Image (spheres, grey):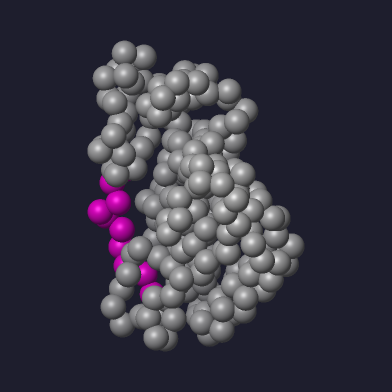
Amino acid sequence: MTVAILQSNYIPWKGYFDIIAKSDVFVVYDEVQYTKNDWRNRNLIITPTGLNWLTIPIRVFKLDQKINETKSASSNWNKKHFNSLKLNYGKASGFNDFKDILEDLYFDTPENLTEINLKFIQCICNFLGITTRIIDSRNLDLTGNRNERLVDACEKLGASIYLSGPSAKNYLDINLFNSSKILVEWMDYTTYQEYPQLSPTFNHNVSIIDLILNNGFESRKYLLY
């Protein structure tokens, strides 16, 4: 059994969905502090004038508020984001394949950031044929420090492999996983091929929405799973 654990992001990049697809269980770990200017409430799309942020406005009511305590500060951000995507990708070859789904996603959005992100993540997974079980870390009653909580989640789920993004190499305690007989494997994002994109200079580090709206039902062949 392979388990991956990440914070939720807003319309994440394609690598996020590959790590979900390569796992048997994907744990959304939003019991940590919300960080400004991060990927939790925003992501990049491509426009005729270059990269542009789609950002969900956020209410910050305390310094240590968690991601799963965070709420949007505006009731019409969803309409603005949908109109921006329609304006910038309306003529893209894959737009019509995803248009109705996209409109439904933005038609009625929750207020809670974790719920917003999960709604988009789960819907995109369905479109891409990703069937991985996605769960909330709060259901696992995790204990310990940062590394211990990751191991605790793996043990409670019966994992033999913990799949992680490469950036975690800076803090992950491999010995702690080894002592629990859990093998750590690292995602390799270096083999992505370029896809048709509305930009003269290709950019991998944008929302998966860019891949889907440019390629529609052909999107999956540009992923790793």
Say whether residue 48 is magenta.
Answer: no
Left or right, residue 78 beside residue 28:
right
140 up-or-down from 18: above or below: above
Name which quarter of the figure residue 197 lies in.
Answer: bottom left
The residue located at (32%, 19%) in the rendering is 176
Name which quarter of the figure residue 200 lies in.
Answer: bottom left
Say whether residue 189 is magenta.
Answer: yes
204 up-or-down from 50: above or below: above
The residue located at (46%, 41%) in the rendering is 6
The magenta span reads: 187-196
Number of numbered markers: 0
Residue 23 appears in view: no
Residue 165 appears in view: yes
Where does the image place residue 177, in percent across and percent down from the top left?
A: 33, 21
Where does the image place residue 192, in percent across and percent down from the top left?
A: 31, 58
The residue located at (45%, 25%) in the rendering is 149
Where does the image place residue 25, in percent across and percent down from the top left?
A: 52, 33
